[in-house]
Image: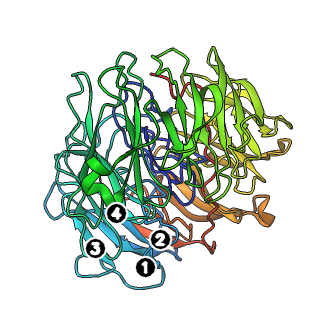
Amino acid sequence: MSFRYSPRTALALLFPALALAACNGSAATTVDGGAGERPVSGTSEAGAVRDTRINDLVAPEAPPPLPPAPPPNAMSKTVADGRARMVGFIDDTCSNQVPASGNGDRWCAFTLPDKQIGKTDLWVVNVTKVAAGTRVTCTGGDPNCLLMTPDLWTGQPMGNVPKHPTTHRFDGDTLIFHANADPGLMEYKGKIFAWRPGMAASKQISGNQAFNCSAHFQAEVFVCVENLSDPTVDPFTFDLTAGKLSDAAPTVVDHIVPQRPGTQSSQWRVAISRDGSTLAWSTGGTTVAQTETLWTVKYADLAAVGTKKTMLGMAGVSRWQISGDGTKVYYLRGYNYPAAGTDPTGNLYVADFPAGTNEAPLVPNIAAFSALSAATNVDSGVGFFDGVKTGTANYRILRDRTKPTEITTVVQNVPGILGLSRDLRFLFYNKQEDPDTGLTDGYVVKTDGTGNCTISSNVSILGNVFGAAFSPNSSMVMWVDNVDLNDGVADGYVANPDGCAGKKKWADRADFWFFHGNDGMVYTDTAGAEASELKYVSFPGGTTLGQPVSIQKQIARIFGLTVDQNLVLYNIAGVKPGDPDGLYAFQTPFTGTGLTDGGAPPAPAPDAAAGQ
């Protein structure tokens, strides 16, 4: 199986309707997964959304054998010996709260075989200490390498549901992991645990029948989905629970009915406020008359949620998102909860968050929207689709919520968009798409509606899938072409988005890339079914690619990266008896955080909120 996920978990999506509004400053984005969906785990990035369209492309049955494993880079430090393997997915393998909690050290999670055959140990290691030259041993007794559990859940069920190793990951500085459950579960139902640096041991944060949990990226609070009902019996329901890590046990917040009666369109979502103080959620009922209602409760009041929860405005609030500054909530009224194949429509409103006061209409008859934020704690309005017709729609931007008549039409009659620059100056979009492969053509336009230019008129590219489409300062736009659908890799290309000038190829068989601000990026290329080459490249002047530097050849395709990209963790692929096996850390030349707020949230596709 070849899996393609895009990088940078700036927004932690627990399932299609959950967003955490405090992810390194990015605005929350909640894009519905469509009707009939079970809750699933996933990650998303503003500007680089995880794309599942090529998740299930099958790799060749017998890839060619790898050559003998090369030795690790001489400048690398050994994190752990033996069959140490990372959990999470690249950017959430390690703690990633900004700024880091406690003394500022970064911790990363990995597995080792347990002494008992069939069981797997989960460890966390202080990679800041490793990089500084401290000798760390992961055998017990070392305060810089701690055993979390000797019984990690390692199930790998089919579909986009929690599975090992990606479901065990750091949300901010909170490690979330599943343990003490049957590895053969087709859908996880068991205990979920959490740990943060400074804690002597992990603690169970769910009941014994939990599906998934997600933590805030700054505050020590969390939310979980538990007690899923029988999927063959209507209506499908589950419990929403939440708590603080200091609580003795989570609190049942509400009983969720996630699917609209009749159409089976999604009628629920949940978010944690930017400051981590408030939980917001919505759900409809088992009849059409029981309209979706948005509620809020302070985490400090969870123990009395029944009397302390507050309904935001009136019932009938759908597809809501908290604004980038955390003071408002955008939502649809009169939403039609469409069945599959029916165009979605609703009226866009805004109100104070969390009070729900000062409700004001913004735009009527839109299909879908996304709250925009051009900088940390800044509300930049909304991008939205309207005029849906035969699978296409118009993409427009309302930049100032106090001036609802001042709307800019960016592009018309398009099936979707591929990326939006951090500063909201450029939009990467497509006009055509191959429904079988997800490949598209590609164009860039300034968001004032001018300067339209062509990246590729051929339906052969992917944008915003292998990495963020735009560099943080919008000086470069990146995409891939010549996609190998078996291995899930492609050639990397770059151009100046202002006119699409200077198009050139910068990588053969690129796999992933991660920007370190405007200084450079860490990436992998020359990838095959099992291995790739890990590299970094600087951006002279912040506008062009310099000369690439190889860190390590023949690494396993999934690697780990600290949020500041100062450290990258890797395994060497194709290890045979006697070859160097273990987990290694390389210190890049990049300094400082390199953070640029994660990128601007893209709008959903025109039919993203429609029933599937």
**Image height check: is 517 above or below 53?**
below
Q: Residues within 10 Å of mark 3 (few under 14, many from 20)?
A: many
SS at mark 2? strand
Q: CA distance from mark 4 to mark 1?
A: 14 Å
Q: CA distance from mark 1 to mark 2?
A: 8 Å
Marks 2 and 4: in contact by CB < 8 Å?
A: no
Give the mark nearer the N terminus: 4 vs 1: 4
Asked where in the image residue 247 lies, by quadrant, the reply is bottom left
Q: In the rendered image, which residue does mark 3 sit on?
A: 146
Q: Position of residue 336 (x, y in %)?
A: 49, 20
SS at mark 4? strand
The answer to whether residue 241 is left or right of residue 612 is left
Q: Amino acid at mark 2?
A: Ala
Marks 1 and 3: in contact by CB < 8 Å?
A: no
Q: CA distance from mark 3 to mark 1?
A: 14 Å
Q: In the rendered image, which residue does mark 1 sit on?
A: 130
Q: Position of residue 293 (x, y in %)?
A: 40, 35
Q: In the rendered image, which residue does mark 4 sit on?
A: 110
The C terminus sits in image quarter: top left
Q: Position of residue 325 (x, y in %)?
A: 59, 55
**Image height check: is 344 above or below 472?**
above
Residue at (26% x, 32% y) in the render: 237
